[in-house]
Image (cartoon, rainbow, N blue to C red):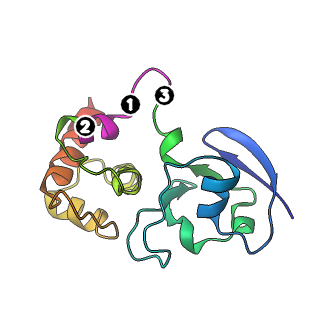
Amino acid sequence: MKISFILNGKKIEIDAPPDRRVVDLLREDLNLTGTKEGCGEGECGACTILVNGESRLSCLMLAPQLEGQKVTTIEGLASAEKLHPIQQAFVEFGAVQCGFCSPGMVLASTNLLQKNPNPSRAEIREGISGNFCRCTGYQKIVDAVEAAARKMKI
């Protein structure tokens, strides 16, 4: 079936079977490998993307659900010239270690800061609570999101 949507600011039209998962469509059909599959069951958050600005788990979505939607993956967050402020803060604060959770964590943080530009540390923890990280202990991630929120206000 033909599916038409906006992906990282560009109109996409692609043929996909109706049972094709979005994570597979992005990674295998569109070569956007920043979206990771961790658990395949919606438990880890590694496959988080933004659909119309809201965090969604791409392993739990089917390709036809993208019809007419605006989708942002980690590849669409930064400009060609520089990283998005959240990505930059993750680098500066050492919130990226193995990097597997980072794309989903960054997109969940983006969604959080769009809704709440001045979150408390508790609100940041809640905002990223659907994303698991096995390396950082979360402290550096919370620090990075907090710093990005301050930078984005300027």
Mark 1 surroundings: few (<14), some (14-19) or many (≥20) residues within 10 A? few
**Element under disc 2:** helix
Contact? badges 1 and 2 (CB < 8 Å): yes
Q: Quadrant of the C terminus?
A: top left
**Residue at the spot x=43%, y=68% of the render?**
38
Q: Residue type at mark 2: give it.
A: Val
Q: Residue type at mark 1: give it.
A: Leu
Q: Position of residue 69 (x, y in %)?
A: 68, 56
Give the CA separation, mark 1 to mark 2: 10 Å
**Residue at the spot x=36%, y=55% of the render?**
100
Q: Quadrant of the N terminus?
A: bottom right
Using the image, determine if residue 107 lies above or below residue 129. above
Q: Residue type at mark 3: give it.
A: Ser
Q: Which mark is residue 23?
A: none
Q: Position of residue 127 (x, y in %)?
A: 30, 63
Q: Which mark is residue 83?
A: 1
Residue beneath label 2, please?
A: 91
Q: Position of residue 119 (x, y in %)?
A: 22, 54
**Residue at the spot x=50%, y=74% of the render?**
40
Residue positioned most to the top: 81
Mark 2 surroundings: few (<14), some (14-19) or many (≥20) residues within 10 A? some
Give the CA separation, mark 3 to mark 1: 6 Å
Q: Nearer the viewer, mark 1 or mark 2?
A: 2
Q: Which mark is residue 79?
A: 3
Task: Give the extent of the magenta segment.
Answer: 80-90
Q: Position of residue 21 (x, y in %)?
A: 65, 69
Q: Nearer the viewer, mark 2 or mark 3?
A: 2
Find residue 89 and report its image quarter: top left
Using the image, determine if residue 108 lies above or below residue 89. below
**Residue at the spot x=60%, y=41% of the render?**
8
Query: Is 41 inside the magenta-drawn segment?
Result: no
